[in-house]
Amino acid sequence: MSKRSANDTQDGQPFQKTQASGNRREVPVVDERGEFEDAWEDEIESDEEITNANAEEDEDGMDIDEVLPAIEESDEVPQAPLVYIPGTHTLGKDEILEPDDSVYIMRHSMNVNWPCLSFDILRDNLGDERQRFPATAYIVAGTQADEMSKNEVIVYKMSSLHRTQKDGDDSDSDNEDDDDDEDLDEDAILEYRSIPHAGGVNRVRAQPPASSSLPPVSQPYHVATWAETGKVHIWDVRPLIESLDTPGYSLDKSRTHLPVFTINSHGKAEGFAMDWAASGPSSLRLLTGDIHSKIYLTTSTPSGFNALSQPFTSHTSSVEDIQWSPSEPTVFASCSADRSIQIWDVRTKGRKSVAGIVTAHDSDVNVISWNRLTTYLLVSGGDEGAIKTWDLRNVKKSGSGVLDPVPVASFTWHKAPITSIEWHPSEDSIFAAAGADDQVTLWDLAVEQDDDETGMGETFAGESQVPPQLLFVHQGQQDIKEVHWHPQIPGSVISTAADGFNIFKTISV
């Protein structure tokens, strides 16, 4: 949550290294050429001018030191910034983390009545590539209430998402009228509509529309919920969205309070894994995986949904996450507590995986994300806190006896289980991750170690342990469960935790 920036010297030459994080702020003291800037913008005299001045002094008999005392040079080294490195530093008894808003373009926190383990972003008709503020976002979430009967599926509308006011932004302005109204630091508005849900919601996934915007009004907007009761419900949340945007809109409870379809294939087995295929409204496909290692496919027809009875059965433990291939409509990937990642083709007889990584992590593989731009890349997060990126071109057929491939990248920054991971929707080298260590981290695989900086020593305590691919660390939430990029507001990230939602946009992405 702060910008990591430090100044040091190497053989007497100043240098500056910057990287984004989230806890403190500091002002650079060197210019882009590596020279110290004159804060007073004084002109520097040449040696010739100084010589002439000395000569004039001898003629006039005046010693300049008698008029202006000599300026003593300071041997003090600029203090390194106070940056909190998770896993390296420990907060003292009376210490708290303070976010550095200079590294945020936008940052809002929103409290809710009940924690939401899972949420998904709903597409809207406000346009793609939105850069203007204030912004608006829609999400759907499911609650974990203290009693089963109190749980709900909720559609939230986040509006008045203003640009974050920077400290001192107005100090250099000669005209107060020049202030941009978009920079006002105001509270966001959180509105919602809800429907009752039997039992806590383990995971929520919204139907990906055929186009980049909200499905037409004539079509339902489907959302699936994995309930702790072992059932998967499919809902039409379009009326909830319409009621948020239309004054005086009256919800028809007979339409909204009952699911469109309920999948009973899993019996009483609870589950978390779920993903919709990106397809048209008349050919929806939904995969669901349970704690008993079974995966079921549900499809849609013009007359309704159809849950297929034969499961996919190559995992030996709980199925934790599922992702459809972004390029092959019949292929999907899954990960499991059996430490493996499996690749499947729904056309295969026997419902067995066609390829896989037998030991992808040292512990449970909790989450995966399939890159939608570079479709041979898949990133995974494990219970041991590791993040790994895989080249699926190196994954061999199941049962081939070939050794598991080596990940193309591996990081062990997080100190607790990875709870969520997702590739950036328009940048194929960037992904976001969330962990049970209360961190949301942003990564860029395109960043490489700068050999020119090696051997220069640490600029602040613990920086040598920071991977160069780590762009940003967002903190401040407790028990973070899920993170998603907003596909229509570039660079914006939404996360859910036990204490509510955060939505932010950083200067790093």
Image (tube, rainbow, N blue to C red):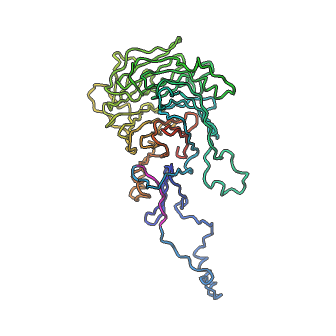
Main SS of the magenta part reads loop
34 relative to 184 in the view: left or right: left
Q: Residue furthest left?
A: 401
382 relative to 505 in the view: left or right: left
**Quarter of the figure with residue 328:** top left
Q: Identify whether 93 is placed above or below 472.
A: below
**Quarter of the figure with residue 401:** top left
Q: Residue furthest top?
A: 303
Q: Position of residue 313 (x, y in %)?
A: 34, 21
Q: Position of residue 475 (x, y in %)?
A: 48, 46
The residue nearer to you, when weighing 429 against 317, is 317
Q: Position of residue 429 (x, y in %)?
A: 46, 39
The residue nearer to you, when weighing 4 against 56, is 4
Q: Which residues are magenta?
A: 77-86
- Tell me, yes or no, whether the highlighted magenta stretch contains residue 79: yes
Q: Residue at x 56, y 50 (%)?
A: 101
- Tell me, yes or no, whether the highlighted magenta stretch contains residue 193: no
Q: Position of residue 303 (x, y in %)?
A: 53, 11
| Residue 491 visible to an observer of this rendering | no
The residue nearer to you, when weighing 323 against 495, is 495
Give the tally of numbered discs: 0
| Residue 75 visible to an observer of this rendering | yes
